[in-house]
């Protein structure tokens, strides 16, 4: 089975830290503690991924709760794979990833998200990211043209 990258474990820990803060600044609530144990083992063994199949059930459940709070798809509704591209210019997924997305599990989807984020070559990460950063004024001026 695919692995859950350490950066996703970190994100899940931060999600739970903000959702259920430590009551005394020392003790960790159960979901954070479960994820922190997995994170600590990854660091100790110099690993970058946790095996989802052997992950403790409480840690996996905490990770899944975080996963449910993330966007499901990187699609920005500009799909060039429908035009014959092997790699979508809009989201960065391969043709196969676009086709199989509905049947992919959470771990495989996050692995795809990680790859396209690291590559950062899709329009999702440049052209349209810049427009979003410009704010509503730029969007209004574009719609008037």
Image (cartoon, rainbow, N blue to C red):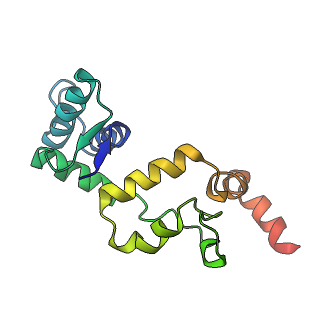
Left-right relation of 142 to 24 = right
Left-right relation of 33 to 120 = left
Give whichever of 88, 144 is nearer the camera. 88
Q: Residue at x 17, y 43 (%)?
A: 31
**Residue 92: x and y, percent?**
58, 59
Give whichever of 95, 67 is nearer the camera. 95
Residue 102 found in image quarter: bottom left
Which residue is the extreme one toward the top?
44
Q: Residue at x 20, y 28 (%)?
A: 41
Whether residue 138 is situated above or below residue 85 in the rendered picture: above
Q: Residue at x 29, y 30 (%)?
A: 47
Which residue is the extreme one toward the bottom?
82
**Number of marks drawn:** 0
Which residue is the extreme one toward the right?
145
Q: The C terminus lies in which quarter of the figure?
A: bottom right
Residue 51 found in image quarter: top left
Whether residue 96 is situated above or below residue 18 in the rendered picture: below
**Residue 61: x and y, percent?**
17, 53
**Residue 81: x and y, percent?**
60, 72
Whether residue 36 is situated above or below residue 20 in the rendered picture: above
Give whichever of 140, 40 is nearer the camera. 40
**Residue 141: x and y, percent?**
84, 66
Left-right relation of 62 to 98 = left
Left-right relation of 121 to 95 = right
């Amino acid at each position: 089975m695919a692995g859950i990258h350490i950066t996703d474990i970190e994100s899940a820990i931060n999600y739970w830290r903000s959702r259920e803060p430590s009551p005394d600044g020392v003790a960790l609530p159960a979901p954070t503690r479960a994820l922190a144990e997995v994170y600590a083992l990854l660091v100790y063994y110099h690993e970058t991924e946790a095996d989802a199949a052997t992950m403790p059930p409480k840690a996996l459940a905490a990770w899944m709760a975080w996963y449910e709070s993330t966007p499901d798809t990187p699609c920005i509704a500009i799909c060039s794979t429908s035009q014959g591209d092997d790699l979508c210019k809009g989201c960065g997924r391969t043709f196969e990833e676009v086709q199989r997305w509905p049947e992919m599990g959470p771990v495989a989807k996050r692995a795809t998200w990680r790859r396209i984020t690291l590559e950062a070559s899709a329009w999702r990460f440049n052209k349209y990211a810049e427009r979003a950063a410009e704010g509503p004024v730029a969007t209004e001026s574009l719609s008037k043209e």
